[in-house]
Image (cartoon, helix red, strand yellow):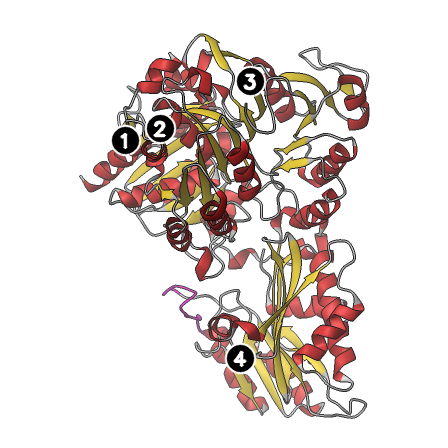
Amino acid sequence: MAILVDGTTQVICQGITGSAGAFHTRGCLEYGTKMVGGVTPGKGGTTDANGLPIFNTVAEAVRATGATASMIFVPPPFAADGILEAAAAGVRVICAITEGIPAQDMVRTRALLREYPGSHLIGPNCPGIITPGRRVSGEGASARFEGGCKIGIMPGYIHLAKADAPAGKGVGIISRSGTLTYEAVWQCSALGIGQTTCVGIGGDPVKGLNFIDLLELFNRDPDTDGVVMIGEIGGADETAAGEWVRKHMRKPVVAFIAGRTAPPGKRMGHAGAIIGGADDTAQAKIEALKHCGLAVAESPADLGSTMARALGLPVTAGAGIAAMA
Amino acid sequence: MKIHEYQARQLLEDAGVPVPAGQMVTTVDDAVAAASALLSAGAGRVVIKAQVHAGGRGKAGFVRLVDSVSGAREAAAFMLGNRMVSPQTGPEGLDVRRLLVAAAVDIVREYYVAVALDRASGRNMLIASAEGGVEIEAVAARAPDAILRVPIHPLGGLEPWAARDLAFRLGFTGRQVAQAAAMFRKLANLFVGLDASMVEINPLIVTPPQEGHPDGRVLAIDAKFSFDDNALFRQPKVAGLFDPAEENASELRANEFGLSYVALDGTIGCLVNGAGLAMSTMDIIKLHGGDPANFLDVGGSATEEAVTEAFRIILQDDAVRGVLVNIFGGIMQCDRIARAIVASAKEVGFRVPLVVRLEGTNVDAARRILEDARRDIPQMQSATDLTDAAQRVCAAVAG
């Protein structure tokens, strides 16, 4: 079990003929994701380098392939349109990797998405979603996997399926930051903690699924034993999530907030990461989360060990490296 | 992207929002001429304001109210001849090259009004208060109920009834109501239409009754606007207002290469991919007793040239005594970073210790590249993980 996607999920790529779309379609295929086609308006009827069929519209692609998930690499000016096209075509999991979409496009898109309650948007400006597959051969960066679903740009080999985890534990990971998600995954895997599903929700101020939506799904997923939640300065989403955890969560939640040393008022890369008022600094969020009973990692290097302790597992470096080798 | 007050005034006028008469000048003589014209047109007093992006102008003496041509000359000469130093500028201060000369108007009441994006609801929000002319943060802290919030519908905009309702709640009366409501709707439309990220009018004022306006006029006095960088491609009018002189030169150059760079005042230069990891790298440096010299996110699609440029920008800072490279490759391929390190060693030269931590996409190829170059880059150390990287660079800088 996992959330949102699994080894049976069929996936298309919107923007499959662009350089990033093509590169990562291949990466997903290599991981074992059931990539079934792509969309580039005007290139319908052709195939990509992997032999996948290309369609002019998402609706056509869905009709022909039965895909229920989409990975969007459409350039920023047209990406919001791509999200809405996917929703209108009935795509259930829409994963927008594109960075740099105008905020007002997302304000409008989010409002329009209410008409498609069966569609879930992940992102934009995110690494995507992965339900790790089982390792079948090889090790490290050249390991091969089976039965998983990687939709996005994350390196697959750092993940450890729960079924491969020595202690038999699997956690969910939710993060606003891309590469920091990989850090959390890597630390968990190294300690032998598997992952059920990892979701990058993206760094933009207006986005699709948020912490609480995913905490709810992980709370209901019988395979998920705990959750790592990675936030950053700006906004109040993490604080709201902390309150939700306090009231509803039946599993341990470990949190980290990036940006403790960020100077106020300076924009740190993510459009969302501007310290606006007193209550959205890293320190204020950390205090609020601790108050709600979450285990907050003090250092970004302690994400895995904090999770291990929360699960009652020994913190043995290398436990998982053995499982991955 | 931020713009100047005089530019924001122009955008307000273009949108039909009334502002007091005034103009931007760059010389003392032009300031005198502008002030003289306003005084002879009936303005009792004239306000002269330095046009810089930094705040704290009033306390620094760079906003002056004058009632004569000689007063205007003296104020303009002071502002154009001195650097403005305020808590927001740093001790070196800012060069003032432009002034706004505007008619000072009599004020009966002051309000605050702004439009911003509310992340929690994913909607634009009009924020207003009958306590204007003061810092809104202070009002928020002291009397949160004094700040009214009206969501702007993502598809329908600010409906006339909602604007009117807000005007009544703020205490506008008589013919002021229609003026204020019209202004709120224009600000909401301007915000969305120009892809703004912040539109702030403080104060919005009501004048005493004048001819044709028995209940006074509603005017926007001071305006602060900023815009969504991601939307500048479709806002040529806004993009044309960009003033590079107001930006940090290194941050600008980084931008040209698609890098996100913020200068800080520590000694450890950081080169990281991803904003969250970059912030965390700064955090962990601090945890181990070091001080980050910058935030630098090379992003996912940076070329080898861009990464080399990133090293150049980091090393240009004389305070930098060590560099930490922390890359967790996803969309970014580690071997590209490794090749850039080798190229930078030749083109830029590392004058300080370099600690490299690589993980993720194509990491094996990257490690081979660095291993082969080890002899040519003796100041380079490899780190096994995040803590190891932070400890190594902090030790290198301390030692």
- Amino acid at pointer 2: Arg
Q: CA distance from mark 3 to mark 2?
A: 28 Å
| Image mark for residue B388 | 1
Q: Mark 2 highlights which residue?
A: B357
Q: Say which amino acid is labelled 1.
A: Asp
In the rendered image, which quarter contains the C terminus of chain B? top left
> Which residue, given by chain and number where applicable, does mark 3 sit on?
A148
Q: CA distance from mark 4 to mark 3?
A: 69 Å
Q: Secondary structure at mark 2?
A: strand
User: In this rendering, which labeled residue sits more in front, label 4 or label 2?
Assistant: 2
Do marks 1 and 4 share a chain? Answer: yes
Query: In the rendering, which numbered label is found on residue B76?
Result: 4
- Frontmost of labels 1 and 4 is 1
Dot 4 crowding, Cα within 10 Å, few <14, some 14–19, many 20+ = many
Q: Identify the secondary structure beneath mark 4.
A: helix
Q: Amino acid at mark 4?
A: Ala
Q: Position of residue B360 (x, y in %)?
A: 44, 23
Answer yes or no: are tags 3 and 2 on the same subunit: no
Residue situated in front as seen by the camera: B151 or B326: B151
Q: Position of residue A275 (x, y in %)?
A: 47, 56
- Compute the Cα span from label 4 to label 2: 54 Å
* SS at mark 1 in the image: helix
Q: Quadrant of residue A117?
A: top right
Tell me how far mark 1 sits from mark 4, CA to CA. 56 Å
- Distance from disc 3 to disc 1, alpha carbons, whole Å, reads 32 Å
> In the rendered structure, are the residues bearing label 2 and label 1 in contact, judged by CB atoms less than 8 Å apart?
yes
Query: Which disc, if any, is residue A95?
Result: none
